Amino acid sequence: MAKVLIIGAGGAALSAAIAAKQSGADVTVVTKEYPTRSQTCMAQGGINAAIGADDSIEAHIEDTLKSAKGLADMKAVELMCSKAPEAIGWLDSIGVPFSRTEDGHIAQRRLGGASHSRACYAQDYTGLKILHTLYDYANKLDIEFVNERFLLDLLVENGRAYGALFLNIKTGEVEAITADSVILATGGYSKLYHSHSTNSKAATGDGIAAAARAGAKLSNMEFVQFHPTALKSSAILISESARGAGGKLLNSKGERFVEELKPRDEVSLAIYKEMQKGEDITLDITHLGEAFIEEKLPQERKLAILYEGVDPVNDPLPIKPAAHYTMGGIAVDLAMQSSIEGLYAVGECSESRVHGANRLGGNSLLEIVVFGKIAGENAVKQLNKEPLDPAKAIKTAETKLQRLFDAKPQENFYDTRAKLGDLFYTKCGIERNAKELKELLAFITDIKTNKEYFGIIDKNRAYNTNLINYLEFENLLQVAESVAKGALENETSTGAHRRSDV
Ligand SMILES: Cc1cc2nc3c(=O)[nH]c(=O)nc-3n(C[C@H](O)[C@H](O)[C@H](O)COP(=O)(O)OP(=O)(O)OC[C@H]3O[C@@H](n4cnc5c(N)ncnc54)[C@H](O)[C@@H]3O)c2cc1C
């Protein structure tokens, strides 16, 4: 029986775990937090599938390709969109409580860039309901979960992945888990933009950084999607479902300046340009009324009251674009295998060529379910002929950790991490130019050159969040360099970003 190690426990990981287990493998899922907390639970708007009477798979493919601005792969997009109706049927069958129409069909709404109402939803808790249902189902299948383990490095020998090293967060010890194949499902890197991101604090690109250190190919790293409507002070997301329901974007004069349901890149750029003129932008859903907002957008209302101090029933919401989704990641083929044998990647940490320069809203939840299953089914086919010994790799990781415990840091990496986020937002945001990208790269190089001045203050081994945050900071730095370099090299203005100097 093949042993499959899955790193991450979001929607992509759980879909892969279920498929691998059902294909006969022994499956272990490892996460740095708890499965139910994975960022997938934050998804609000919905999951795409052409199941409406007037919709078609061809229209879904066309919308996806159009939004991707020619940078998606036709075969990958066809695979994802054609399997969408089956994926929704499966989620429905295992108990995801999708919202319903009065005649009992799964309800759908229109998100930006879509030609039809195609996003299936569960109020505005879609990701949470999917994640928790997948977790319940995985538990029923007796899948093994190992929580509070932080991925340090992948175990690769002779060009083949055979497991990974983890920091046991509870004890501070280094542990190895070996397997026949490894699936990375560790999410994206939008937290590079720090306080200018809608993402959970766990979205630090750890898996991508580990894959790159192991020699895996990355792709499209400079493509970062900015969501048009994050709350102005907290960057908490107000989903596209608010605009889909009729929300209006207004400038300081109360005038509309863009068609709200255009693709995200176009709406974000329009908002950015208004803000450059000194305009304050708001999202107005007051005309939808309290009953509608409570029924369809209850989470968004709560978040707005809690984090912005504004009740959208009564007042327009102050918003700004914020880093939301990272299109780049570990390059994979149609079987979700990376450039390293036995190493698979799926979900936001991968670049599966379905989003290109701009992801279509509702396609990420779809990708994690459809491609998660494909990753799980393919990973099972790998069998490691000669078992390898991780002892040497464990020793190297322990020595590195010990150095951190012994050092006396002089600089506060939390401040540097926040500054890096501010610089990314201003210099590698919706609009970029070579001069500012070179300044950003110089800042990154400077941090890397002076890395010995950074480190941990808390020297406890057990539950050391200072250490975890530091390891995340190291991963972010590594990812930062790929993103900034990619942005400098890419002189085209397409999808999520514009080059102002070319
Ligand atoms: C606010 C918000 C709203 C969204 N709304 C929608 C929507 O409506 N529709 C849509 O299609 N998409 C939406 N998205 C995007 C979508 O939710 C994500 O792209 C998708 O859920 C990513 O799933 P994933 O399984 O790849 O990663 P995640 O759900 O991010 O899971 C990553 C997992 O990896 C683990 N991990 C990370 N690093 C390590 C490490 N070092 N060691 C061990 N484990 C690690 C984490 O703990 C976690 O379990 C939204 C995103 C956000 C932030």
Image (cartoon, rainbow, N blue to C red):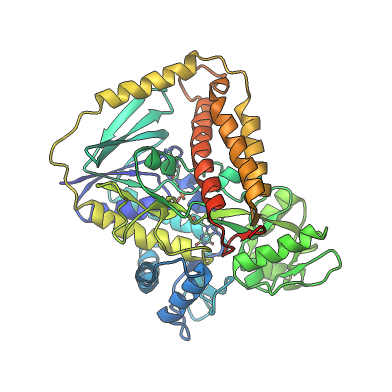
Q: Is residue 49 left or right of residue 312?
A: left
Q: Is residue 250 above or below residue 163?
A: below
Q: Residue at x 37, y 50 (%)?
A: 13
Q: In this orientation, does residue 338 appear?
A: yes
Q: How many marks?
A: 0
- Residue 141 in the image: x percent, y percent? 28, 51
Q: Position of residue 497 (x, y in %)?
A: 60, 59
The relative height of residue 146 versus residue 115 in the rendered view (above or below) is above
Report which quarter residue 91 is drawn in: bottom left
Residue at 50%, 42% (x, y): give it.
479
Residue 411 falls in which quadrant of the image?
A: top right
Residue in the foreground of this view, choosing between 213 and 165: 213
Residue found at x 62% / y 36% = 443
For this view, does 240 lie left or right of residue 284? left
* Farthest residue, direction bottom: 54
Q: Position of residue 67 (x, y in %)?
A: 53, 70
Q: Is residue 4 above or below residue 469?
A: below
Which part of the image, by quadrant, shows the C terminus? bottom right
Nearer to me, 276 or 165: 276
Front in this rendered view, residue 74 or 289: 74
Give the residue at x 30% y 60%: 374
Please say whether residue 97 is visible from this viewpoint.
no
